[in-house]
Amino acid sequence: MTGKIIRGIAGFYYVHAEDGLVYECRAKGIFRNRKIRPLVGDNAEISVLGTDPPEGNVDEILARRNELIRPAVANVDQALVVFAAKDPEPNLNLLDRFLVMLCRMDVDVSIVFNKTDLADEETVERFRRIYEPAGYPVLSLSTYTGQGMDRIRDGLRGRTTVLAGPSGVGKSSLTNRLMPEANMETGSVSEKIRRGRHTTRHSELFCLENGTYLMDTPGFSSMYVDEMEPEELKDCFPEFEPFTGGCRFPGCVHMGEKVCGIKTAVEEGKISRSRYENYRLLYTEQKEKRRY
């Protein structure tokens, strides 16, 4: 029988199988020998040991379409990168790091700004002007009022979606809105550091309807982009590509070059200065890593 791993805790893997039951499974020792670790999101073949309660063994992990490292999940169709429009104020450098990571994983991305009930329309519109020209759909959401929920639901159907973003922005509240029986613990924002308390302690897939899965993951507030040559970074900023014809040299990295189409586009307001400055910071960071 085949199914999808929806949760993994303390050596047990919970598989939502094609018969509609969720089986508590152990993974065979052969996976350790092959150095394969079953991941949430994996499609698996299982052998059934019993149905009352549902128990079995994971016999085989089927081929993965993709794999994220942090959080460690597999077979993701798309990501909703969730940030708060306010409380806490969005860290756009962190947001751009998420986008670079997901670009490297070849995962479709939409950006969700939650807590729009706390922010004015111009604030959300400013974020839209930064990210929609880069090719990212920008969604407005308030899990408090429910505004924007219908559009979110429509975009999830038939896909496996991961929620990404730092703590305190409303990822668990969004999961609870979409699937109240998930009953995810939510946390307030620390008054001292204006950062959310971590409330999700393990990755878990929730089946919203047949073929539609939503994954909530442990929140985190820093992101490091690894295993990338500095020269590859520009490919993760898709809004650069239309302006590369203005660069004097092939392979221009848009940093110190005097004649650079990207730098000109920034000066003319055709590329967000925020995005470009974050590109420069990430490029310098990657360059420094390569020195050591």
Image (spheres, rainbow, N blue to C red):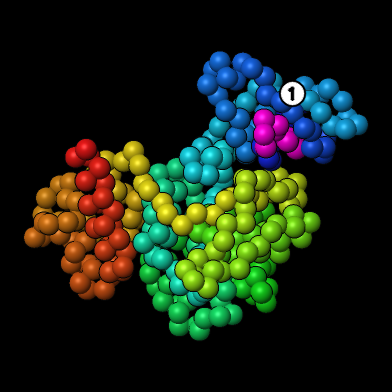
Q: Position of residue 246 (x, y in %)?
A: 16, 59
226 shown above or below 133 = above
Q: Nearer the viewer, residue 94 or 116?
A: 94
Question: Badge 1: how crowded within 10 Å, few (<14), some, or many (20+)?
Answer: many
Does residue 14 belong to the magenta stretch?
A: yes
The residue at the point 11 percent across, 50 percent down is: 249
12 shown above or below 230 = above
**Left or right: 265 with respect to 210?**
left
Quarter of the image for the C terminus: give it: top left
Residue furthest out toward the right: 52
Q: Amino acid at mark 1?
A: Asn
The residue at the point 73 percent across, 48 percent down is: 207
**Left or right: 90 with respect to 275?**
right
Does residue 118 belong to the magenta stretch?
A: no
Extent of the magenta region:
9-18
Numbered disc 1: secondary structure: strand
